[in-house]
Amino acid sequence: GLCISQSVKIPREPRPGEFDKIIRRLSENPNARVVIIFANEDDIRRLLQAAKKANQTGHFIWVGSDSWGSKISPILNQEEMAEGAVTILPKRQSIKGFDRYFVSRTLENNRRNIWFAEFWENNFQCKLSRHAVKKGSGIKKCTNHERIGKDSSYEQEGKVQFVIDAIYAMAHALHNMHKDLCPGKVGLCSKMESINGTLLLKYIRHVNFTGIAGTPVIFNVNGDAPGRYEIYQYQITNNMTEYKIIGHWTDQLYLDTDEMQWPGASQEVPSSICSQPCRLGQRKKTVKGIPCCWHCENCDGYQYQADTYTCKMCRFDLRPNANNTGCDPIPIVKLEWSSPWAVIPVLIAILGIMATLFVVVSFVRYNDTPIVKASGRELSYVLLTGIFLCYATTFLMISTPDVVICSLRRIFLGLGMSISYAALLTKTNRIYRIFEQGKMSVSAPRFISPASQLVITFSLISFQLLGVCIWFGVDPSQAIIDYEDQRTSNPKIARGVLKCDISDLSLICLLGYSMLLMVTCTVYAIKTRGVPETFNEAKPIGFTMYTTCIVWLAFIPIFFGTSQSAEKMYIQTTTLTISVSLSASVSLGMLYMPKVYVILFHPEQNVPKRKRSLKAVVTAATMSNKFNPKGGLRPNGEAKSELCESLETQDCVEGGQPCEGL
């Protein structure tokens, strides 16, 4: 679980500046602070000096091998650099028998050790030869009465136990080898005259005895003895320094963390890492070949943190939570009644419905008056029904979508307009046919009676209903939640839109037939612009259609130009409902409000004018065209005819039968 950030070799004979270079390399990754040292005392001392020179006091945490152990010499005069250092020493025990033996050694009883004389001089700071003593040097001549431990300090070398055990291990191995190769024979036999090192190593690895300190001496398959170590930490407390035992290792680690102390007398364990831990919502992207080093990458967009190393996309109806560790449902929105986008269309629709009902009530109340009759009562009520449905459509478009609401939207969104424009088209077509017929014949055109006009109107409306029925059969209506409509790049503002499954293309098809009726009606309105100015409703119908075309020409770019907007649902719904309501308002205002005004405020004008037969009217129209062929070229494009007044009242008589609605 550990990674090595830098691995640096200390040369056997370091050049000047070599340790400074080592410290610079160790400092390349400032997050990696723990330095494990396998070096001799002198190299440790010089490395600490270089760290002090680089002003790295307290930065590095040193972990020393047993060559450092609890020695003073590597840290002398640079104790602050070694503060917090963790070192180890093999677990050892002082051998009392060795102490008794060693302190009893003198120059007389230890002549077999050729180095003992040199040790004696160094230990007692004296010289055995009088000639070696220099005057004024302060070094005296040895008297041979000095005693180890009395006239000098003495502390048993820590590795004595292991040296004794090593010798016993060799002795046990040779003894076992002798028993196997020379059974029953004292001394060496021929098989042991030339020792086979490989065979001897095998015997050494198989020894098993109790050592001088009472611990078992055995070796594993690699030839290593069991690890038994004491763990020290160099601590500075109140200017007092010490190597303090903080734990040990015997088959497993025991560490008393409460006894540990770090640079600056801190109890907080310092960190030594290659990379900082990633925050929530970030994944680790490891550096190739260095598992402890990584880059932190955000799980952005609609991704969440699946595990330490992986980001995954949330499901289509979910978005990441606040810290990108999971996914939450995307909020569902719809057009609320309290929204400003809904209030304005609803207000217009309510006013329109009230105005429509007012006109209907006025027409019903004055149903038999000349103006109501002249308007073509049957088609007027059909047209007013269409206008009412256009206004009512607003409430369906704003209501919470479900199967019923979506079905009603399909039916009534185009139906109201189809009824309105079918009635207007029938009217303009009738006017056009009457005057076209008058140019060629004095006979009346066919299908101009009220019943015929209703049949034609309802036939045109039936195509709209037939199309809707086919649509229901192919694709039944349903309410859906569209998560793509407001799936913004920022998931925090993403929303699912509750709406009916009516695409923009379906909407075009739904309104397409109404548009066709509207355009056709406009064409007939243009063709009938030359009829007598006082004739029926030709000119009001013309102005109505021109204005309606302008309304829908403005609607198209607004509706489809906002298809990529985040406010698409609100803008398109509001635009559509207002356009439909405006179309209905134009028809209501231009065709019926003037009539209601006359009916209510100028009843003296609501009287029949003189009557003429249809034959006389057609004859007058024909003669007018013959004797005044350029009548249609007058500035206002009108052909004046006093005889057409009888058509204004729609109360002419032919063969004793009333012919209203002409």
Image: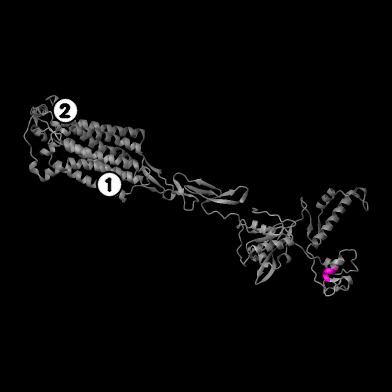
Q: Which residues are magenta?
A: 120-125
Give coordinates of residue 15: x percent, y percent.
72, 58
Q: Is residue 239 something one can see in this rendering? A: yes
Judge by depth and name the residue closer to the eye, 478 or 314.
314
Judge by depth and name the residue closer to the eye, 399 or 345.
345
Picture quarter with the C terminus: top left
- Residue linked to disc 1: 345
| Drawn side of residue 450 relative to residue 498, left or right | left
The numbered dot on residue 479 is: none
Task: Name which quarter of the figure residue 473 lies in.
Answer: top left
Judge by depth and name the residue closer to the eye, 595 or 316.
595
Give coordinates of residue 374: x percent, y percent.
13, 36
Tell me the residue at 36%/35% (across/down): 475
Q: How many numbered marks are there?
A: 2
- Residue linked to disc 2: 436
Q: Secondary structure at mark 1?
A: helix
**For the residue marked with disc 1, what is the amino acid?**
Pro
| Residue 346 among those drawn in magenta | no
Give coordinates of residue 408: x percent, y percent.
30, 40
Q: Is residue 241 above or below residue 575?
A: below
Tell me the residue at 15%/26% (across/down): 437
Which tag, 1 or 2, sits closer to the chain's start? 1
Tell me the residue at 60%/52% (across/down): 293
Q: Secondary structure at mark 2?
A: helix
- Magenta: main secondary structure equals helix
Task: Name which quarter of the figure residue 628 lies in.
Answer: top left
